[in-house]
């Protein structure tokens, strides 16, 4: 079970979180024209890297904040966590 | 009956307390502190089971977790458990143990015939022998294998015991209480660290209990006791025996299995049987010690053959002799201690040492005590079928591959030692890549992967002095980093014998023309020739050899066999062991019970139960409940002998004719507040929200970004910047997360807050033509006319003195209202409604009637919004705005979503107007067509229409409304039904929606 540091609550067990996918995907702006290709990329296309991956988790059984987690998908090592408004280098 | 093999004084058992038990029906006794194994050996019983493949007689081999053979079916305290390790299970009064894997009995086993049909079971026999024909599997092979080779039998009774889970955090977790573990725990505890010390066995001390050493002038055992006593007295230390740390998981989480009460004669009602600990440790000391490995020789599985350290442990801990005419067969010095222990107890051993004549401290001691030592010797083959009677031994030539002399000696046990294998399982599980240590011919942990530090024998240090030093240093350094305190501790003086080098000798050669089985893996019956076959057949990777031969794949995880297997492969392949590599270690280290894994999450505790504030009323009024997620909802209220069908029909009919009330508390409710709330809703829902006035509700539809309908519900504008959203019961949690996602990540600029209020409000729907009359009685001072409170209107008013919200919304398609009061007033509201509603014929209705009402109205719900439908599929495209953008809008233009023949919602009625159509039925053109019969759609929801008094169903069907008027078959192979149906509109009742507006 992973041990995830919520930027608001501190280190908490994985049980308290739910996974939210790739955090680097950006939704096209509302009310803005978007090509079918860009839209399809946003909705469907995800990388599945082996290694470092910046992803979203929601602290559902805690503060309910969505957070960013930089994790190694192979070893599960967590390098960094951040608020969604913050950048992960 | 006297115990012929029990020593008079020796041992740590309690001789004042006899314990009776039975083995294969025979009444026996042992003492408190015995294991099943030690008690049986004391009674001279060695034959305990039959081997897996060949059904050869098997006896005890070890004295603890390393045991590959002695797995018994054990009954005690009213439960029966298979595969219990007899060398670990403590004896309790009334216990009854039976041999498994033998039929009809351990003494006469029909399967033993396999032993004489060896060609039947070579390596890979599972793959080769039983390949064809397929039908033979079920009828012949499988029943045969199951009967002859099954392990124990799992109980089919309900497990009445209690199991617990516990979460714990500590600075340092120490796994194993041998010398290095004790030293680590002690040093860390003195630094003020929060320490957990876990010991698998009932007694603390590990090898200190059996080794002939002294520490600070105390015996090993006394020193261990002194340290444990001090540790127990410290508030920052938790000391646990009977506790096996069996898994090392991500982020330094370790899992421990504690045997809490199996050994107790009496326990209080709430004492759990076993407990699972999830321990998050900042640092972990792995002081798991080492396991002796055997030397491979002919018939080395005969009962009476033991690991040499196990034989010593039986003497020193249990006061039991494994035999009275022992042969000690060794390639190293440690087995001499076993010989000395025998000698001390007046038993004359013979030592066969594979090394050439030489001397060391312990060899000299053995010599001086007059023990018969034969160098360059080894056991070639053991004789005796159900017990060792003699052994053919040989003097090895210098090449160690041939014999100078062969003779037979009498013996009743053989104690074998092929040196020591560090227990690296936990280190390996942590992700540590192991490295091969030439000096000890075994793998030890390499660079740290998590926060694991291996010490003592687990790290390949086999001397007490080194182990203690290692333990004190690591315990102190690791904890000092955490507590910032460093207490100096003097490392104690140690007195131990110095051992000479071991012999790199693992497998005894065979004389020409002799071919007894030489087992590498006892539990899975894998012999030297099996490994040779696998290599001859081209298997190279050790992982493949393992799977082909099943080497190391039994429940003992190859604790005594892995390294010998590797040595064998490397010898045959002419490689060095590190090139061959090792197989992966996986948790659990030892088998654990399913009950422990499940813990308290069984039956009613499997998940939380959510009850509405009116639950008790429903119970008292014969509600039959249905699970809606964690909620309990009344499905129907049973009157007399009514069936579900009859009751739901009565309830639904009453709504259509009079008025009914339904508990709708379980609907998800979300409070939405903020100046940008309208803009937010406008983006979340497909329809327009900017112009909804205060005091009005609106039906809304939300999509996922891929255009699929996510949920539907009504949202009401309570005040300027305050909205009340409802969701379906099932989607409540998902919708909240969905809203939070967009507010926190996608549109943080919107000034809006959301919070779940599902449990703050109790809700009741009153529906039916007489609902307005009833409402006016409930709110005598309120104008509830159609003009004052129109369809989709909203009012706040006092309900007999308590705050309430009135929403004029309808799911049943009738004139209807939903009243919300604070949860605490839910029961009050409900009872008042029942009382006031009497004169209007008000009756409660459950979810079954609710479904009937919405289905015949053509209102969609979960079965239609099943994660595959878009708005136009379910006739909700009227709610999709063309003017504004919203979540999922861009996806609605996808080609596949706009194909004319796409599956869409329709209604179905049976041609005979009688046969109910099973939900899930497939719609086909021709019921007798050849399979696969082309599927035109499926039946999503079915009911008995109370309005038209015949069955009616909703279906999602190809070409949708174009099919209206045509006839098809609804087939359900599951229910073995085929019903001819006609396609009609999905709006079966009141298609214009006049009633809700009346
Ligand atoms: Zn948090």
Image (cartoon, coloured by chain):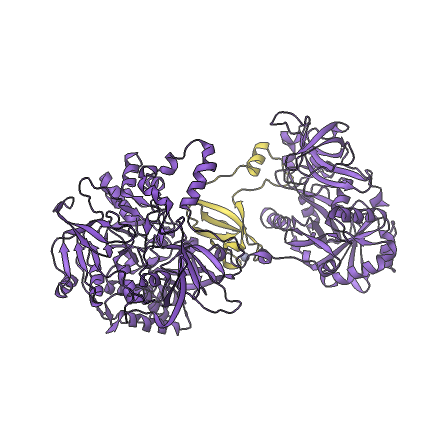
Chain colours: A yellow, B purple
Tell me where residue B881 sits by quadrant.
top right
Residue A26 relative to residue B982: left or right: left
Q: Nearer the viewer, residue B779 or B66?
A: B66
Q: Give x and y (percent) for residue B344.
A: 21, 67
Q: Quadrant of the C terminus of chain B?
A: top right
In the image, residue B888 lies at what x, y percent? Answer: 64, 39
Asked if one can make out residue B697 in the rendered structure from this viewpoint, the answer is no
In x, y percent, where is residue B32? 38, 69
In this rendering, the answer to whether B187 lies above or below B954 is below
Splitting the image into 4 quarters, where does residue B945 fall?
Answer: top right
Location of residue B948 in the rendering, given as x and y in whole percent from the top left corner: 82, 39
Question: Does residue B738 appear in the picture of this structure?
Answer: yes
Q: At 42% from the left edge and 73% from the top edge, which residue is drawn?
A: B235
Residue beneath the point at 63% across and 57% down: B609
Q: Nearer the viewer, residue B840 or B867?
A: B840
- In the rendered structure, the answer to whether residue B807 lies left or right of residue B209 reads right
For the N terminus of chain B, which image quadrant? bottom left
Picture quadrant of ligand 1: bottom right
Q: B620 and B180: which one is in front?
A: B620
Quadrant hosting residue B144 = top left
């Amino acid at each position: 079970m992973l041990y995830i540091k919520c930027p608001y609550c501190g280190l908490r067990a994985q049980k308290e979180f739910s996974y939210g996918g790739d955090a680097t995907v950006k939704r096209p702006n509302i009310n803005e024209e978007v090509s079918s290709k860009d839209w399809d990329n946003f909705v469907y296309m995800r990388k599945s890297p082996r290694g470092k991956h910046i992803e979203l988790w929601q602290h559902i059984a805690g503060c309910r904040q969505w957070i960013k987690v930089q994790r190694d998908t192979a070893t599960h090592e967590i390098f960094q966590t951040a608020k969604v408004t913050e950048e992960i280098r | 009956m006297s115990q012929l093999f029990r020593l008079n004084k020796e041992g740590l058992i309690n001789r004042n307390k006899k314990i009776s038990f039975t083995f294969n029906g025979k009444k026996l006794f042992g003492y408190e502190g015995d294991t099943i194994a030690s008690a049986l050996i004391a009674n001279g019983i060695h034959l305990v089971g039959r081997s897996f493949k060949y059904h050869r007689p098997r006896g005890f081999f070890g004295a603890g977790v390393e045991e590959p053979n002695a797995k018994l079916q054990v009954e005690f305290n009213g439960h029966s458990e298979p595969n219990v390790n007899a060398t670990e299970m403590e004896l309790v009064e009334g216990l009854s143990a039976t041999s498994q894997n033998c039929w009809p009995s351990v003494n006469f086993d029909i399967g033993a015939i396999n032993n004489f049909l060896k060609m039947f079971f070579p390596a890979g026999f599972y793959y080769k022998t039983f390949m064809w024909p397929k039908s033979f599997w079920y009828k012949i092979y499988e029943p045969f294998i199951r009967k002859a080779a099954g392990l124990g039998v799992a109980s089919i009774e309900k497990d009445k015991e209690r199991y617990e889970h516990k979460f714990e955090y500590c600075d340092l977790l120490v796994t194993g209480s041998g010398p290095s573990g004790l030293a680590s725990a002690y040093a860390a505890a003195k630094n003020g660290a929060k320490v957990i010390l876990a010991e698998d066995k009932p007694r603390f001390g590990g090898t200190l209990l059996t080794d002939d050493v002294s520490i600070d002038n105390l015996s090993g055992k006394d020193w261990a006791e002194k340290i444990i006593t001090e540790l127990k007295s410290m508030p920052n230390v938790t000391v646990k025996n009977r506790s096996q740390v069996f898994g090392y998981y991500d982020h330094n989480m370790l899992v421990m299995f504690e045997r809490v009460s199996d050994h107790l004669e009496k326990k209080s009602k709430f004492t759990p049987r076993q407990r699972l600990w999830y321990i998050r440790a900042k640092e972990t000391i792995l002081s798991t010690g080492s396991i002796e490995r055997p030397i491979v020789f002919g018939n080395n599985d005969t009962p009476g053959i033991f690991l040499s350290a196990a034989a010593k442990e039986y003497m020193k801990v249990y006061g039991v002799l494994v035999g009275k005419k022992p042969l000690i067969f060794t390639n190293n010095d440690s087995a001499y201690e076993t010989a000395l222990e025998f000698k001390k107890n007046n038993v004359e051993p013979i030592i066969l040492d594979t090394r050439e004549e030489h001397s060391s401290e312990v060899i000299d001691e053995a010599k001086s005590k007059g023990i018969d030592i034969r160098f360059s010797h080894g056991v070639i083959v053991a004789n005796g079928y159900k017990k060792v009677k003699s052994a053919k031994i040989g003097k090895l030539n210098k090449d160690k591959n041939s014999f100078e002399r062969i003779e037979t000696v009498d013996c009743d046990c053989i104690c074998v030692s092929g040196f020591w294998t560090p227990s690296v399982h936990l280190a390996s599980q942590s992700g540590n890549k192991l490295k091969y240590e030439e000096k000890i011919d075994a793998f030890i942990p390499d660079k740290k992967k998590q926060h694991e530090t291996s010490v003592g024998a687990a790290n390949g240090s086999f001397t007490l002095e080194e182990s203690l030093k290692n333990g004190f240093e690591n315990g102190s350094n690791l904890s000092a980093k955490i507590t910032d305190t460093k207490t100096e501790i003097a490392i104690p003086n140690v007195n131990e014998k110095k051992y000479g080098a071991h012999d790199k000798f693992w497998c005894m050669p065979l004389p020409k023309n002799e071919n007894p089985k030489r087992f590498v893996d006892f539990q899975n019956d894998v012999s030297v020739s099996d490994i040779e076959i696998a290599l001859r057949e081209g298997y190279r990777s050790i992982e493949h050899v393992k799977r082909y031969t099943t080497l190391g794949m039994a429940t003992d995880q190859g604790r005594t066999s892995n390294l010998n297997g590797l040595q064998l492969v490397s010898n045959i392949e002419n490689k060095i062991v590190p090139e061959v590599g090792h197989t992966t270690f996986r948790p659990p280290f030892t088998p654990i019970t399913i009950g422990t894994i499940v813990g308290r999450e069984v039956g009613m505790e499997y998940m939380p139960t959510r009850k509405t504030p009116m639950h008790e009323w429903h119970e008292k009024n014969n509600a039959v409940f249905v699970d809606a997620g964690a909620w309990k909802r009344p499905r129907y209220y049973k009157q007399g002998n009514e069936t579900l069908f009859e009751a739901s029909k009565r309830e639904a009919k009453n709504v259509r004719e009079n008025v009914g009330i339904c508990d709708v508390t379980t609907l998800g409710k979300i409070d939405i507040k903020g100046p940008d709330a309208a803009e937010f809703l406008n983006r979340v829902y497909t329809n327009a929200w900017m112009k909804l006035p205060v005091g009005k509700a609106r039906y809304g539809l939300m999509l996922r970004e891929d255009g699929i309908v996510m949920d539907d519900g009504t949202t009401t504008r309570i005040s300027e910047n305050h909205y009340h959203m409802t969701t379906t019961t099932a989607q409540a949690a998902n919708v909240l997360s969905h809203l939070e996602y967009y507010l926190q990540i996608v549109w943080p600029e919107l000034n809006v807050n959301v919070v779940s209020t599902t449990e703050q409000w109790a809700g009741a729907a009153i529906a039916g033509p007489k609902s307005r009359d009833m409402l006016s009685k409930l709110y005598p001072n309120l104008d509830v006319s159609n003009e004052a409170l129109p369809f989709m209107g909203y009012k706040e008013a006092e309900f007999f003195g308590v705050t309430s919200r009135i929403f004029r919304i309808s799911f049943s398609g009738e004139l209807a209202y939903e009243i919300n009061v604070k949860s605490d007033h839910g029961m009050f509201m409900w009872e008042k409604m029942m009382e006031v509603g009497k004169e209007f014929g008000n009756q409660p209705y459950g979810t079954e009637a609710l479904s009937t009402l919405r289905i015949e109205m053509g209102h969609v719900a979960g079965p239609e919004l099943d994660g595959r439908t878009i708005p136009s599929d379910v006739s909700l495209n009227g709610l999709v705005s063309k003017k504004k953008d919203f979540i999922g809008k861009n996806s609605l233009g996808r080609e596949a979503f706009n194909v004319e023949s796409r599956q869409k919602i329709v209604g179905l009625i049976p041609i005979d107007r009688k046969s109910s159509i099973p939900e899930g039925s497939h719609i086909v053109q021709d019921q007798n067509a050849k399979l696969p019969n082309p599927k035109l759609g499926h039946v999503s929801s079915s009911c008995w229409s109370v309005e038209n008094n015949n069955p009616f169903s909703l279906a999602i069907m190809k070409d949708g409304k174009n099919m209206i008027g045509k006839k098809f078959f609804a087939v359900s192979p599951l229910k073995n039904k085929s019903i001819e149906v006609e396609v009609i509109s999905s709006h079966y009742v009141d298609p214009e929606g006049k009633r809700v507006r009346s």
